[in-house]
Each structure stands twice: as structure tokens, then as C-alpha cells.
Amino acid sequence: MDKIKLFLISLLFIYSTLNAKVTLKAPDSFYSGDSVVFAISASGNNIEFPNITNIATYPIQNGGKSSQTSIINGKRSQSITQRYIFYPTSDVTIPSFNISVDGVIEKTPTKTIKKLKVEKTDSKLYSLDIKTDKTDPYVGEEIKFELIFRYREDLQIAGLDFSKPSFNRFWAKELTAQKPISKNGYIEQKLNYILFAQKSGILNIEPLKIIVNTIDNRYGSYSFFSSGATRSTPIYSNKIKLDVKPLPDGIKLIGDFTIDSTINKNSIDQGEAVSYKLTIKGRGNIDDIDEVKLPISGVTIYENRSKKDFDIVGGNYGGVYQKSYSIVGNNNFTIPAVEIKYFDINSKTIKAIKTKSYNIKVKTKNKKVVSLEVEQPNEKIKTKTVEKEVITTTDNQKLLWFIIGISTGILISFIFIKYKYRSIKVVENRIEKEIKKANSKEQLLKIVIGYIDIDKDLDKIILSLDSKDDLNIKNTKKEIIKIIKDKKLDILF
């Protein structure tokens, strides 16, 4: 009797499913980071789907729509399937939705989807492993990371879907990928990265995933589908747990470094500039070196942004930090020593490296001393008797003297303007000739350094003379002369 009841219930379920106007298809579970795709299908002549924008707190993307029309015994029917995509991070329930079918509201069933814990794939066909050369690094210490993917040689691989790891809370540098090799009946490929942890504490590198698309031979070797049908298999790696230790207070660099500095001269004239260059080299997190400032009072400092070049030597990351400065002062000054502290990974101690300091002598220009003379109050004032003589002038004489005065004033003004213009041209020609005679950027810098702070465009060119090694001296001279002429700068007067 119980068997008969179970059979009848089964028939009723099959009948209701076959005749259902609305159905929902969704997976039972998902892995973290994977997309969840569900589909709602409805059959009828007039079908309206709801506008689904969110499920719980997860936004919904439209996955596309498909339709199929069939005619049975002259009766036409339509079936429409709407797909939706979202990315949940925990267990989620798809609620019931109202679908209008031929003017009647139909409801979809609810569906709960479970989040599964990602575990490393155990398969004889594939393997995906990740590893690091250390598990307890310091913040900023170099970590070598390696990904190894292997699959059996006899597999018909149609393609691989792999997203590069994001490495949250790590700074990452990808190295050149190695070519696949054949090894013990498997094809093996490796990807290598260098990581630097950005904070201390327990940091996890979550399992990575590769989707392997293989030719699906379930259709048989003579099937029309055997050449194009594929099967997708997700392959997961292991998980890595790192216990990252903090650096000592106030220390940002870790590795092994050297420092050096140079100047182009230690004695200058007033208005001239000293060129100072700073170089830091080493293996370690050289990216974390901040812009070095020179604390010198009473001078004007022009500086470029630092230049950082990175490389990998012997499998270790590092490079060179360079920065140049132009320093102008009116009095003697000292370029102080620059000190850099770092944590030495081998000795587990803090080390300090620093440059030497430089005393710069500034030669003053001779200035004309002008004194103010005051008449002594105790001198006797001599008086002189002046006899007045009255001279009578006629109107014609007055008019003549007036004309002579006007003519003389005009003549003097003309001579003064012409003389002044000629003087300006002489100064202008002299400066232009000096600039044109300069055969190197050092000679040119010596000519124009005294004109800093007159014009911002001219300042940029003066600074570039001391900072650019590949400067075109000919074009630079033309630019300076053009600025002086176009803007009629005060250096001409």
C-alpha cells in the first residue's frame, strides 16, 4: 500500500512539473569568488518577467534571454528563459518571484544555495600548487611566490581560464613566465612573483583557481559534437598562511643598501648654483624610500622628483634611487649629511648609512659703498649782498625765448631716448653674445644663474641645465634668448 502511495505521489510530481508554467533552475552550492547563475523559465503566449536588481545585498546582472516556439496540434506555445548572475559571499536564498503568464500571476519556488569551503583539488589528471620561500616574513621583506600547474599529457586541453591573483595586502611584482615543460608524463608550467607584505599580522593567500576546458568525448568519436563540445573543470590550489612580523618603530626599509653623494663644486660666486646628487643602491624594498629633502636654511633649493630604477639580481629584487638638487645661496652654507636607516635581514639589526657633508664657500661680489654726508651745524653761514638790476623785456623777446626753450627741450628728449635705446641694445647684444658663445651647459648655467626668480619660464630652463644630462644646448640657448627678448626682462637694463 505504501509503495502504491509513493508511486502515485511521484506521478503527481512529474505531472505537475511537466505542466508547470514557471520553473526555477539554480545550483545547490557555490565556492567563494564564483558566480552563481540561475534561470527562470515560463511557458505561455504573453509572458512578463519582473525587474530583479538585488538578492539580499548582492546586485544582479542580466545573463541574457532565450526563447523557443512550438506548435502542437495547431496550438502555438512559447517558452522563454531569463538568466541572472550574481556573486554571493555567503549562504543565500533566492526568493519567490511573480511571473505574469497570460494575465495570471505565477510564483517561482524559493531556493537556498550553500557556500562551500574551498579545498585543494585532489585529482590524478590535474594539480595546482602555490608556495612561498618563507612563512614568517617581516613587513616589506621580499617573499618569493611560485604557482605550479600540472596536467596529464594525454588530456585534450581546449583552453585554460585563469585570472591573475590579486594578492590583497601585498605589493606584487610578476616575473617572466616560464615555458611549459614535459615532466614524468605531465605538462608543467610555473608562474613566479615577488611579494612584499604591507602590514603585519596573519595574512592569508587564498586558494587560486584555474578552469580547465577539455574536449568532451562523451558524445562518441563519430558524433557531430565531438569536435566542439567541451567540459569545464575548476581546479583549486592550496591555501598559504603567513605570519608577518612588524619592523622596528620608525623603520620602513628592509634589505641591504649603500648611499653616495656628489657635488660639482665647493666654491661658487653669489648667484651661482651647486649641483648635488644623491644615490641609494641595494637589494630590498627600495620602492618605499620617500622623497629626500635637504634641510638647509638661507638658500634656494631646486629639486627634481627622484628617479627609481628596479631590477632583479640573483633572484633578489632591488634597484637604484637617484635625486638631484640645485642649491643657490648668497652666503656660505653647509649641505648636511643624509642618513638612511634600514633593517638588515641577515643580522636582524638596524643599520644606518649616510653621506658626507659639504661646506660650500660663497664668494661675495664687490659692492660700491655710498655714504650719506650731512652738513655740520656749527659752520658759519656767510651772507652776500646782491644788487638787483631790473631788465625790461619786450613781448617779441619773450616769444623768441619761449620758442628757443621748447626747441631745446625737444632736442634734449630726442638725444636722451636715442642714447637710452642704444644702451639697451648694447646690453642686449652683450648678453646675447655671451649666451651664444657658451659651448657647454656648465658655461651657460654660469651666465644665467644670476637671473633666477625674474621669470618662472626662465627658472625652469636654468634648473634643467643642472638636472638633465641629455640636454640640447643649442635649443636651450635659443629658448633663453627668445624669453629675454619676448618678455623684455629686467636683465637687459
Image (cartoon, helix red, strand yellow):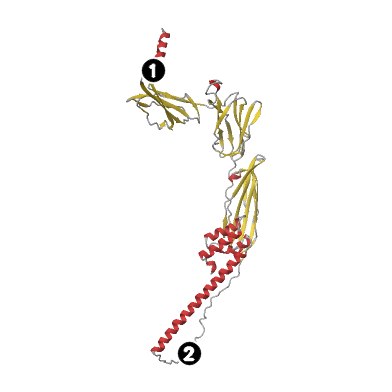
- Among the 4 quarters of the image, the one containing residue 330: bottom right
Q: Which mark is residue 16?
A: 1
Q: Which of 450 and 350 is in front in this view?
A: 450
For label 2, the residue is 384
Q: Is residue 297 at all visible to an observer of this figure?
A: no
Identify the residue shown where x is 36% and y is 20%.
74
* Classed neighbour count for the residue bearing mark 1: other residues with Cα under 10 Å, few (<14), some (14–19), many (≥20): few
Q: Which of 107 and 185 is in front in this view?
A: 185
Residue 158: percent from left, percent from top: 56, 28
Q: Is residue 14 at all visible to an observer of this figure?
A: yes
| Secondary structure of the residue carrying numbered label 2 | loop
| Number of marks in picture | 2
Q: Nearer the viewer, residue 50 or 73?
A: 73
User: What is the distance, in whole Å, between disc 2 and disc 1 at their CAs?
Assistant: 141 Å
| Secondary structure of the residue carrying numbered label 1 | helix
Q: Label 1 near label 2: C-beta < 8 Å?
A: no
Rendered view: 151 above or below 478: above
Residue type, numbered disc 1 = Ser
